[in-house]
Amino acid sequence: MQQVVVWEGDTAHGHYEVVDALYDGRLARVLYSGDRQAAQSGLAKDGGSDLLFDYNQRLLELVLGVLPKTVLLIGGGVGTLAKAMVDTVPGIRVDMVEPDEFLTRLAYDYFDLPVDERLTIFHTDGRTFLRDHVARYDMILVDAFMHTTIPKDLKTVEAFRAFANHLQPGGVLAMNVISGYYGPGAHVLQRTYAAALQTFGMVDVFLASRGYSLWLPQNFILTAQKGTGRPLRGYVRYEPIKPPEVSPGVAIHDGD
């Protein structure tokens, strides 16, 4: 299939393209950031049941297993995961935090984001939202990136304390992390896992996809539970992997 650029332009946060193309062998509409440095969001157009990105599908599997009534999604992009939750979970209420207001316009115009009273969108950054709001949620999903890097203020010890403060008892946090598992590129997963352990008693790491060398950067799903030990492994397609070995000193703080 020939790639077709449906929209291209700049927002307050960067340069984007909306492209119709084959992505990982599937007919799709994809949002690229930068000079096509990263596919930020995508919507499958082939009628398949799985979401286009494996990590989004893993997050949706967790939602379908936990069946939360309220979800906070930090890093909404053009709303493909929010749309999937509203479409598949009756009665769910989703608060989506996305700092780039123009991406929400693209979501409605090009990515079929529904206008639904169960979905509320906040145009701010994740830590500001957590500071300014007091609501607690059954589940918090974090999928926030600047290209392929999680903003520092969402992976510190203080950030995980803020996540915990906004979870209901028994609530579940799930975060998309791009990192290696071995080698010099493993520090992102190690530091994020160590920060989560400072607050949460039960933290797991799941592979988002199969077939990648663990020496290469890839998507992992880090989960943390507040006061519960439910077997999340039964909800996700791939079994959790052995968490990285870390010391508390590996975790980063807001002031580091």
Image (cartoon, rainbow, N blue to C red):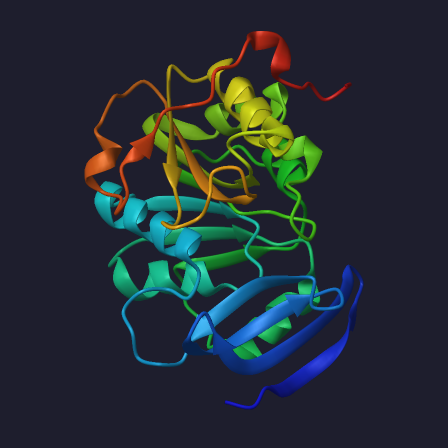
Please determine whether, in this image, residue 179 is positioned above or below residue 38.
above
Write down the quadrant of residue 205 in the picture.
Answer: top left
What percent of the width, then of the height, locates residue 39?
59, 64
Closest to the observer, 130 or 221: 221
* Quadrant (top left/top right/bottom left/bottom right) for the C terminus: top right
Residue drawn at x 36%, y 56% as measured from the top left: 57
Q: Position of residue 44 (x, y in %)?
A: 41, 74
Q: Residue at x 69, y 49 (%)?
A: 146
The answer, for residue 141, to whether it is visible in the render is no
Residue 35, by quadrant, is: bottom right
Against 104, residue 205 (above or below) is above
The answer to whether 44 appears left or right of 107 in the picture is: left
Viewer-closest of 220 and 163: 220
Residue at horizontal 53%, vertical 30%? 182
Front position in the image: 233 or 255: 233
Mark count: 0
Where does the image place residue 25, in percent across and percent down from the top left? 42, 75
Image location of residue 221, percent across then percent down: 43, 39
- Residue 248 is left or right of residue 37, and the answer is left
Against 204, is 47 above or below?
A: below
Considering depth in this image, is 251 or 216 the residue closer to the camera?
Answer: 216
- Residue 195 lies in what quarter of the image? top right
Rendered residue at 31%/65% (across/down) = 50
For residue 232, say whether it is visible. Answer: yes
